[in-house]
Image (spheres, coloured by chain):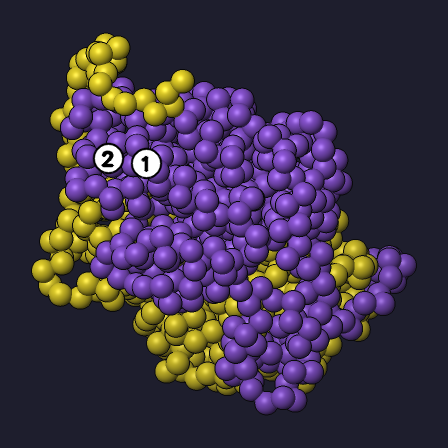
Chain colours: A purple, B yellow
C-alpha cells in the first residue's frame, strides 16, 4: 500500500505532522495527492497547510487512507456521521453505513458510537475506510467510568492515545466549554445540545472544577502530534434552536477555541473548528466572519445549520439550505444531517438521503465560490438534457439510479430513451424540442420583422 | 358564501379590481380578510395593493376563494403546479393533487394541463379550490389550432375571456418575449426552456412577426380588468441552466416586463413578475435587485431557482436552497419544484415532497426577514423538544405523521412518548437530558471555581 511507504520513510523524523513539514517548506506525498484531487498546485496546498487554513487529516497509522484536504482553498467537503447508540445497531450495520457513506460521496466519516464494543466497531471502520475517520473520544471515556462526574483527565488521555494508535484521523475535543460559560446557557430555550458539551457541563457543575480538557489541552496536543491526529475543536455550546443562535455563550466558546487553536499550532498540530447548529439565514454570513476573526481562519466545519425549527423529519432539507449558504460564505466542511435528526438513529436510507442533500449543498457552494471546474459536470449534463440524450443525463446525475427510475416511472420503454420529450410536457409542449427550431434565427431577421411592422397584416384585436 | 355577497354589492361599479379600489382609498372585504391573515393593518394592505407592490389574485367569479396576498410585506407564499400532459393523468388525478396541494400548504395552485378536456379539468379545480388558481392560457389556445404557427390573437383572446369567466385568478402571459430577443438565446446551452416562451419564439420565427401577445397587450388588460384577473408576466426567456443565468436575453425580457407592468397598472390590473429558473447562489440577490428596479417592485414570483444542475431526482432540494435565499432577498412567491422535475410528470407523492421543501424555504425566508410572528411555531416546538414533550413536538411539526413515524421506527412503544431521550443518543448520552441538570448553575458559582483554581486537586497529566 502506497501510504505505508510514505509514512515509513519518515519514521526517524522527530515530528511527523503535515503541518510540521509544510511549515518547513516540505511538500509531502499527501500534499501532492491532495493537490491533484483539488486541481491546486502542491505549493498552494503546502502554504495553506502551513498557514493553518487547510488541514489534511491523516493519522500516520491509517494506511488505507486516500488523503484529502479541508480548507477554503479546496472544494467544500461533507461529513457523514455513523455509529450506534445503546438502544440500536451493531458492527455490520455500521459497516453498511460506512459503505453507503463512501458510495454517496462522504469526504470524511465520524464514528459516533456510544454503545456496545466501541473499539471493535472503530477498528473495523478504520480498516475499511479510504476516507478520514473522526471520533468524539469522550463517548468511549464515559463508557469506562460509572457516572459523568467520575470522568477524569487520566481516562480521557488513555482513550485518546488508544484511538490515535488505532489510526483515528481527527477527534472532536470539547476543550472550549468553560465553567464560566455555563451560566450563559441556562436561560436558553434549548440549553446545551452538544452531547460532549452537556457531559462536560455536568462534570464541571458536579465537581466544581474547570473543564479538564481545557486544563490538559497541551497533553492532548502531544498525543496528537505523535500520530498526526487533527483537532476538531468541538462547539459544545452551539445553539440548538433558532432562538439561541449567535448568543453570548456561543461566541464566548468560539473565542476560547481561537486561543486553543494557537496552542495546537505551537505543536504543529492541525485544527478545524466546529460550528452551528441552528441559525436563521440572515445570521449565517456573520457566523463565518466571526469564526475567521476569532479562530485565525482555521477551517470551519459546520453542522448544517438548520434555518427553521418546524420541520422534524425533513431536517436534511432545512439544514441543506443553511449548509449551502455557509459553504458559499466560506465554511470548509459540512456535517450532514439526516431526515431522522431529532427523532431517532438514522438507518442506511437516512444516511443516503442526508448525503445526497449535502453533496448538493457542497456542490452549490463550490459553484458559487467559482472553484476550478466546479460547474463542468452541470454544464455537461445541461448539454445532454438539451440534446435529449437521456442515458448521458442519467449517467452524469448525482444519483443515476434514482434519476432513471423517476423517468421510467411514466415512460419505461427503451424507445423513450431517445425521445425528444418526457411525460412532464409531452411531445407537443416540450420547450427544448420547440426551442431547437429557432436556433438559426438571426439578429438581421429580427430587425427585418421590426422594420416591416407597419406593413404587418396581423389583425390587431385591441382595435380601437 | 361570504365572497358572493362581497362581489354582489359591487356589481354596479365600473371597474372592480382590487387595485382600482385600493387606489381610490377603499378597503375591500378581501383586503380586510388578507390583513387578518397576515397580521398587517388593512391600511397597509390597501396601500401596498395601490402601489402595485402587493396583489390579491381574486377573480370576481371565483366565489369559493379565501383571499390571500402576494407581496413583500406579506408572508412568503408558495405555488403548486398541477395539471396533466397528453401522455399522463386525468380529472380525478388532478383533483387529488389539488387536495394534496392545499393540505400541505400551497398558497396558490396553477393548472398547467396541456392534454385531455382542459376546460372541464379547470372547472372542477376552480370549484373545489379555496386558493387562487392560475393558468397559462396559451396551452389551451394551442389545443384549438393545428400547428404553433396557426396561433393568433383572436383564439388567444377567446381562451383568455373564457378562462376569466370561469374564475381563473391569475394567468401567465408571455408578452415580454420579443422577436429581437430570440437571437440572444441561440447560443445558450439550453435555449428557451419555458414552454410558453418556446411556443411564441417558434410562432415569431415561422410567421416573421412580433409577439402577438405584446402587440395585443391592452386588449388582454381590458379582459383582465373586467374580471379582476391578475397578470403573472411570464419569463419566457428564463435561464434553464446555470450556464445561461443572468444573460442578455433574460434581462432584455425583464425590462420589457417592466414596460408591460406600467401598461397593466394604467388599467388598474394587478401584476406579478415571473422569475428564474437556474441561478448560482452568488447571483440570486442581484436577480432580485434587478427585478425590483426594472419592474417597479411588482411582486416577484420565482421558479426555484435551482443552484446546481447535477441532481435530477432531487431538484426539490437543489431548488429549495435557491428558493429560500430568493425569498429572503425579497421574492414574494416561490413556485415549487418536485423531485420529478426534468424527468417526468409528478404524481401525488412528488407534489407532497415539493410542497414540504417549499414550505420550509418560504418559512426560512419569513424568519430571516423577521416577518411578524414568523418564528413563534419554531420556538414553541423547540420548547417542547427541550421538555421531551414528544406529542406536542409532533403536533407542531410541518408534517406530523412523518415526524412521528420516524420517531416510532425505533421506539414505537407508547411509553417512549414521555421518555427523556430518543434512539439517536440513547438515555445516557442525551444532551437535553444532561443539560437540564446544569440549569441552576450561577455566575457566582462559576466565579468561585475560577477563584479556587490554585487549590485545584485535579491531577494535571500535562505535568511537566
Q: Residues within 10 Å of mark 1 (few under 14, many from 20)?
A: many
Left or right side of B417 for B460: right
Spot occupied by residue A288 in the image (x, y as percentages of width and height): 50, 32
Quarter residue B282 falls in: top right
- The secondary element bearing badge 1 is classed as helix
- How much space separates mark 1 and mark 2, taking CA atoms? 8 Å
Disc 2 chain ID: A
Spot occupied by residue A136 in the image (x, y as percentages of width and height): 37, 43
**Residue A12 in the image: above or below residue B71:** above
**Residue B405 in the image: above or below residue B423:** below
Q: Quadrant of the C terminus of chain A?
A: bottom right
Nearest to N terminus: mark 1 or mark 2: 2
Quarter residue A389 falls in: bottom right
Measuring 66% from the left and 54% from the top, which residue is drawn there?
A: A2
Spot occupied by residue B185 in the image (x, y as percentages of width and height): 76, 59
B227 vs A80, nearest the viewer: A80
In the rendering, which numbered label is found on residue A156? 1
Spot occupied by residue B347 in the image (x, y as percentages of width and height): 43, 76
**According to the image, label 2 marks what residue?**
A151
Q: Quadrant of the N terminus of chain A?
A: bottom right
Measuring 50% from the left and 82% from the top, which residue is drawn there?
A: A409
Dots 1, 2 in contact, CB < 8 A: yes
Q: Residues within 10 Å of mark 2 (few under 14, many from 20)?
A: many
Measuring 13% from the left and 57% from the top, which residue is drawn there?
A: B417
Amino acid at each position: 500500500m502506497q501510504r505505508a511507504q510514505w509514512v515509513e520513510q519518515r519514521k526517524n523524523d522527530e515530528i511527523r505532522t503535515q503541518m510540521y513539514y509544510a511549515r518547513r517548506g516540505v511538500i509531502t506525498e499527501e500534499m501532492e495527492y491532495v493537490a491533484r484531487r483539488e486541481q491546486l498546485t502542491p505549493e498552494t496546498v503546502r502554504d495553506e497547510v502551513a498557514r493553518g487554513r487547510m488541514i489534511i487529516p491523516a493519522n500516520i497509522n491509517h494506511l488505507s487512507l486516500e488523503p484529502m484536504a479541508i480548507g477554503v482553498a479546496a472544494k467544500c467537503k461533507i461529513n457523514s456521521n455513523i455509529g450506534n447508540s445503546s438502544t440500536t445497531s451493531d458492527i455490520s450495520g455500521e459497516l453498511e453505513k460506512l459503505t453507503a457513506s463512501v458510495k454517496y460521496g462522504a469526504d470524511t466519516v465520524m464514528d459516533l458510537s456510544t454503545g456496545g464494543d466501541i473499539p471493535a466497531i472503530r477498528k473495523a471502520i478504520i480498516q475499511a475506510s479510504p476516507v478520514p475517520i473522526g471520533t468524539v473520544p469522550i463517548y468511549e471515556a464515559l463508557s469506562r467510568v460509572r457516572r459523568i462526574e467520575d470522568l477524569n483527565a487520566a481516562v480521557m488521555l488513555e482513550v485518546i492515545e488508544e484511538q490515535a494508535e488505532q489510526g483515528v484521523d481527527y477527534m472532536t475535543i470539547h476543550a472550549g466549554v468553560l465553567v464560566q460559560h455555563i451560566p450563559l446557557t441556562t436561560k436558553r430555550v434549548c440549553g446545551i445540545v452538544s452531547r460532549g458539551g452537556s457531559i462536560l457541563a455536568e462534570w464541571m457543575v458536579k465537581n466544581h472544577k474547570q473543564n479538564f480538557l481545557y486544563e490538559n489541552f497541551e497533553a492532548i496536543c502531544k498525543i496528537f502530534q505523535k500520530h498526526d491526529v487533527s483537532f476538531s475543536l468541538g462547539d459544545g455550546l452551539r445553539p440548538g434552536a433558532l432562538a439561541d443562535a449567535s448568543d453570548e455563550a456561543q461566541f464566548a466558546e468560539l473565542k476560547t477555541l481561537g486561543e486553543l487553536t494557537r496552542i495546537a499550532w505551537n505543536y504543529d498540530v492541525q485544527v478545524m473548528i466546529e460550528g452551528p447548529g441552528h441559525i436563521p439565514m440572515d445570521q449565517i454570513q456573520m457566523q463565518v466572519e466571526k469564526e475567521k476573526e476569532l479562530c485565525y481562519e482555521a477551517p470551519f466545519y459546520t453542522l448544517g445549520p438548520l434555518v427553521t425549527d418546524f420541520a422534524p423529519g425533513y431536517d436534511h432539507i432545512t439544514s441543506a439550505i443553511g449548509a449551502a449558504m455557509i459553504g458559499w460564505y466560506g465554511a470548509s466542511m459540512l456535517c450532514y444531517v439526516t431526515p431522522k435528526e431529532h427523532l431517532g438513529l438514522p438507518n442506511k436510507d437516512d444516511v443516503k438521503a442526508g448525503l445526497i442533500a449535502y453533496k448538493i449543498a457542497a456542490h452549490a457552494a463550490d459553484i458559487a465560490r467559482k472553484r476550478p471546474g466546479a460547474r463542468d459536470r452541470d454544464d455537461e449534463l445541461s448539454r445532454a438534457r438539451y440534446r435529449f440524450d437521456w442515458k448521458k443525463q442519467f449517467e452524469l446525475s448525482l444519483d443515476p439510479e434514482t434519476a432513471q427510475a423517476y423517468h421510467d416511472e411514466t415512460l419505461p420503454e427503451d424507445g423513450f430513451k431517445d425521445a425528444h420529450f418526457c411525460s412532464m410536457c409531452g411531445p407537443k409542449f416540450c420547450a427544448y424540442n420547440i426551442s431547437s427550431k429557432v436556433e438559426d434565427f438571426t439578429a438581421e431577421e429580427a430587425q427585418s420583422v421590426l422594420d416591416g411592422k407597419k406593413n404587418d397584416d396581423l389583425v390587431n384585436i385591441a382595435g380601437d
